[in-house]
Image (cartoon, rainbow, N blue to C red):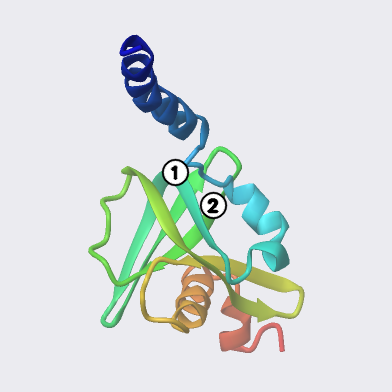
Amino acid sequence: MIIKPIIVRLMLPVAVVFLLSACNFNKTTQIKAILDNPRYFNGKETQIKGQVTDIYSLIVLKYFTVADNTGKIIVVTDRPLPRKGAIIKIKGTVEEGFSFGDQQSTVINESKIKGISIVATFIKKVWDQDLKGVFNGSSL
């Protein structure tokens, strides 16, 4: 019968589209999940979505802060910086940015250059004056 092959040909694309839509290729990870489980996410590529809250450009180092409704995280990039307030999706590798005593910072490296996230996070901490006492001697 000719009808059966025609039905199969018509149903196959529909089935493929249905199966692909069931797979969530655009799945994003909540920032809180990354910050709560840095060992699990360390070195893994992940995708987040949120609002750009701060942007920084320091000669050879560019980074920005992204916040969703669960937390905020620093993103190191070698791409053009997004505008403050923009809602964006970021895909990058989760890395430990900086550890100082019991203070720990986790970042997402969107950059192809590895190893710069430690510097970016340290500068961000100093910029936010979390470590101000370290440099003026008041907490030594």
Residue visible at 44% across and 43% down in the picture:
50
- Frontmost residue, 9 versus 91: 9
Point out residue 76 in the picture as x, y percentages from the top left corner: 41, 69
- Frontmost residue, 38 versus 28: 28
Residue visible at 70% across and 63% down in the picture:
40
- Frontmost residue, 18 versus 57: 18
In the image: residue 109, left or right of residue 34:
left
C-beta proximity under 8 Å, tags 1 and 2: yes
Q: Which residue is mark 2?
A: 72
Q: Which sits earlier in the primary sequence, circle 1 or circle 2?
A: 1
The quadrant in which residue 94 appears is bottom right
Q: In the displayed image of the protein, which residue is found farthest to the right?
A: 102
Point out residue 119 in the picture as x, y percentages from the top left corner: 47, 82
- Position of 10 relative to 57 (above/below): above
Point out residue 74 in the picture as x, y percentages from the top left corner: 48, 62
**Mark 2 burial class by Cα count in 10 Å: few <14, some 14-19, many 20+:** many
**Secondary structure beneath label 2:** strand
In the image: residue 99, left or right of residue 20:
right
**Secondary structure beneath label 1:** strand
The C terminus, quarter of image: bottom right
The amino acid type, in three-letter code, at marker 1 is Gly
Point out residue 20 in the picture as x, y percentages from the top left corner: 44, 34
Q: Which residue is mark 1?
A: 50
The N terminus, quarter of image: top left
The amino acid type, in three-letter code, at marker 2 is Lys
The quadrant in which residue 135 appears is bottom right
In the image: residue 47, left or right of residue 138:
left
Mark 1 to mark 2 CA distance (whole Å): 9 Å
- Position of 19 relative to 11 (above/below): below
**Badge number at residue 61:** none
